[in-house]
Image (cartoon, rainbow, N blue to C red):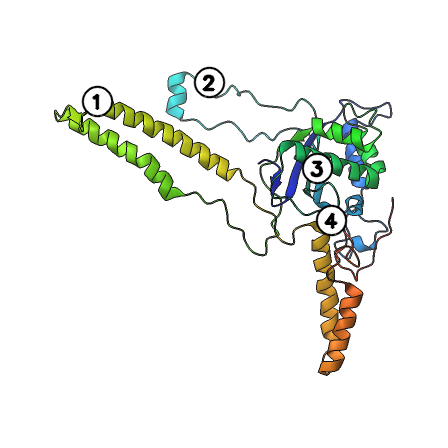
């Protein structure tokens, strides 16, 4: 199923940018670029940790990955290759360029990998209907509006038909018009690979092969003068077996395509709050090990009990690592809402 895989939605939105520009002389396309450049990055390196604020997407706990950029036009990869002799025989003038595709405007491309949930803390789903996927996208749009609404307005204000969008619900409806199905996931968190959607190749091969063999045998018998087989006309048997082979082959192909379209199940610890908690515990436990080297069993037992009480491994929300930072010990950005 498009968009949904491993309990996540992998989203793509192509938002058309207004042509021309306002009276200040800067094009709408450039305005979008300027607003994107203003967004602070995640605190993922010593240089970025010095910045006062972190990436606005880090204000929610559903976004694993997000990217925005301006797409001016599609890339021209050059003339399609063609055999020279065939071109000459067809009378193709290779000096004259062929048609080149262009976009009808510049686009703001927004891609995101999010937990496929409508509320933080809900378990990741294995499957979602198209309507349920839409509900998740609408809930995510509301979350973005609530946590980074000012940045959203500044970026999308230069996009077509954005005027009048003044709520999370309207922003979600606006993004729905720009939604493009995504067929490739952006990440892989699996600690253990799940059982993939393996095809039953041997049963499928037998189902297609048996009537095909019957058709060939019946045809050969017909050629060598045997008019009936078990009281059935061999020519009729050949036709019926060929038709059955074709029908089973089409059904097998459709089954294979449907099987390949099934989303993979979510991993056990795949949601963003759990990932952040795991990062937090990893760091906290490393410090615990370093601090308790050489202690006797009783003291170590007491210290570990204190560790469990302070860090609450079973609580994925508190205490934990914040989104958008490289470690819990790194300088924490200010919250700007």
Query: Which badge, 4 or 1, comes first in the chain's sequence?
Result: 4
* Nearer-the-camera pick, 269 or 337: 269
Q: Which mark is residue 136?
A: 3
Q: Which residue is mark 2?
A: 93
Residue displayed at 61% across by 35% down: 182
Q: CA distance from mark 4 to mark 3?
A: 14 Å
Label 1 to label 3, Cα distance in Å?
57 Å
Is residue 212 shown left or right of residue 75? Answer: left
Q: Position of residue 336 (x, y in %)?
A: 87, 46
Q: Which residue is mark 4?
A: 121
Residue at the spot 28% in from the left edge and 24% down from the top edge: 240
In the image, residue 337 lies at what x, y percent? 87, 44
Q: Position of residue 135 (x, y in %)?
A: 71, 34
Decide: few, some or many residues near mark 2? Use Cα within 10 Å; few <14, some 14-19, many ≥20.
Answer: few
What whole-number distance in Å separates the C-alpha atoms at marks 3 and 2?
A: 52 Å
Q: Nearer the viewer, mark 2 or mark 1?
A: 1
CA–CA distance in space, label 2 to label 1: 52 Å
Q: Nearer the viewer, residue 39 or 187?
A: 187
Say what secondary structure mark 3 lies in.
helix
Q: Is residue 292 visible?
A: no
Q: Could you give the CA–CA distance between mark 4 and mark 1, rounded to whole angstroms?
A: 65 Å
The residue that disc 1 covers is: 235
């Amino acid at each position: 199923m498009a968009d949904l895989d491993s309990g996540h939605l992998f989203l793509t939105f192509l938002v058309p940018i207004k042509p021309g520009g306002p009276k200040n002389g800067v094009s709408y396309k450039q305005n979008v670029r300027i607003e994107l450049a203003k967004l602070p990055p995640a605190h993922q390196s010593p240089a970025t940790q010095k910045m006062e604020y972190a990436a606005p997407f880090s204000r929610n706990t559903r976004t694993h990955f997000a990217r925005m950029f301006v797409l001016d036009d599609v890339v021209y990869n050059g003339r399609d290759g063609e055999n020279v002799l065939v071109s000459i025989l067809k009378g193709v003038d290779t000096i004259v360029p062929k048609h080149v595709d262009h976009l009808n405007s510049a686009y703001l491309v927004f891609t995101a990998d999010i937990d496929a949930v409508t509320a933080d803390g809900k378990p990741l789903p294995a499957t979602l209907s198209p309507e349920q996927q839409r509900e998740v996208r609408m809930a995510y749009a509301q979350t973005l509006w609530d946590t980074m609404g000012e940045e959203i307005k500044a970026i999308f204000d230069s996009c077509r038909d954005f005027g009048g969008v003044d709520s999370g619900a309207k922003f979600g409806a606006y993004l729905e018009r720009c939604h493009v199905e995504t067929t490739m996931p952006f990440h892989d968190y699996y600690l253990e690979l799940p059982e993939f959607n393996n095809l039953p190749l041997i049963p499928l091969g037998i189902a297609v092969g048996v009537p095909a063999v019957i058709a060939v045998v019946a045809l050969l018998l017909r050629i060598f003068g045997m008019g009936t087989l078990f009281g059935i006309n061999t020519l009729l048997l050949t036709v019926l077996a060929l038709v059955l082979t074709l029908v089973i082959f089409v059904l097998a192909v459709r089954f294979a395509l449907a099987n390949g379209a099934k989303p993979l199940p979510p991993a056990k610890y795949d949601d963003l709050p759990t990932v952040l908690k795991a990062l937090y515990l990893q760091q906290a436990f490393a410090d615990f090990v370093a601090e308790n080297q050489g202690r006797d069993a009783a003291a170590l037992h007491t210290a570990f009990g204190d560790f469990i009480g302070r860090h609450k491994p079973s609580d994925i929300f508190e205490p934990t690592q914040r989104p958008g930072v490289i470690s819990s010990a790194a300088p924490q950005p200010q919250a700007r809402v």
